[in-house]
Image (cartoon, rainbow, N blue to C red):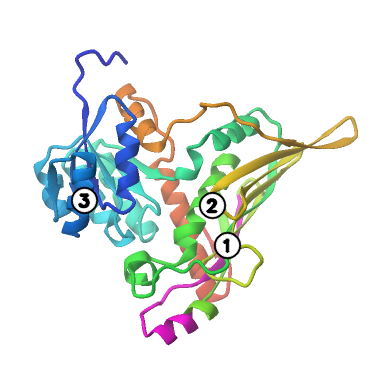
Amino acid sequence: MDSTNMKKLRVGIVGLGMGRGHITGYQTHPEAEVVAIADSDPVRLAKVGDEFNVLQRYTVAEDMIRKEKLDVVSICTPNKYHKPLTILALKEGAHVLCEKPMAMNAREAREMLAQAKKSKRRIMINFSYRFNDQSFSLKKQVEAGVLGEVYFGRTVWHRRRGLPGFGGWFGIKEFSGGGPLIDLGVHRLDLALWLMGYPKPTWVMGSAYDPIASELAKKSGKRFDVEDLAAGMIKFENGATLILEASWATNQKHNEFMQTILMGTKGGLTQQNINEKYDFEAELHVEREGCQFDMKLHPPVPAAKGSMYHFIDSILADKPHMASGEEGLIVMEILDAIYESAQKGAPIKLR
């Protein structure tokens, strides 16, 4: 689209913890301008506003959304507020980029999608682990048929001791909706589903535990009522199976371990973090003339734009965006089913 004489899209950010990253992401796009920010902490609001030279600042997010006539709103708050703030922004005519998870549960996600359809506006979920050179390169290999038909996968994010501060919203179900499954697992789940082409889930079996965190929370005298480890097995309509694991506290070797493995009829892939940090390496595993090869991926640079840049580009070009609200809903349905299965001790059918 020719951007000559085009007015920049007006962007507002709600929540300046994760929201700081959203500001820098939007600033990479020449046709977006962050014109307003909101945060309930006035000290943080002033600090971030000064740092990024954003003049319009609000301690009440609803006031910003109603007054600023925004084209795009990023929702970066505790999970409890994703639905009401997203729905308000949609009603006010803005497109929404919502932090993961999409909502507290699938019911809320459906309400958000219904409002987006009614308002004729977009919802994108910030599944940020898709938006890097390596993930894009892996996706190209899958789409090129290097793996063949993917029939099994395992996707994991474990921490040895990576609990959020006790008493904060992450560990309180009323505000978070759950523990590491909905916090960390959501990223690895989306990445695996995206690489697999988002197959339709049919049933889920799950377990959840809190032996380490509950004892530590009890000793600290602080509230903590979510799991510290959860796992699930997801079966899909095409016959494929995916194992999902996530923890904040578990007795394992690594302080931080992230890995996604997919196995297909022609090949497989492994992506995992390096040196227990947030850098990743990836390999493809194939057979050539009866010999087994492991090929290390060196993705081209640059291959990927960030999620904020992509969202703005998609709006301006009037083309579909990645990480849609519909995909966010599928993720929520799976997470809900894992929690329900863990509670009932039985498989949960979907759809």
Q: Return the disc, 3 or 2, that comes first in the chain's sequence.
A: 3
How far is disc 1 from disc 2 in space, using C-alphas? 13 Å
Q: Which element is circle 2 on?
A: helix
Residue 104 rendering spot, x and y as whole percentages: 36, 61
Q: Nearer the viewer, mark 3 or mark 2?
A: 3
Q: Which element is circle 3 on?
A: helix
Q: List the residue tagged with mark 3.
A: 47
Residue 351 showing in the rendered view: no
Which numbered circle lies on residue 233?
Answer: none
**In the image, residue 215 lies in the stretch drawn in magenta:** yes
Q: Return the disc, 3 or 1, that comes first in the chain's sequence.
A: 3
Position of 273 with respect to 88 (left or right) is: right
Which numbered circle lies on residue 189?
Answer: 2
How far is disc 3 from disc 1 in space, using C-alphas? 33 Å
Q: List the residue tagged with mark 1.
A: 158
User: Image quadrant of residue 156?
Assistant: bottom right
Residue 344 showing in the rendered view: yes
Position of 54 with respect to 280 (left or right) is: left
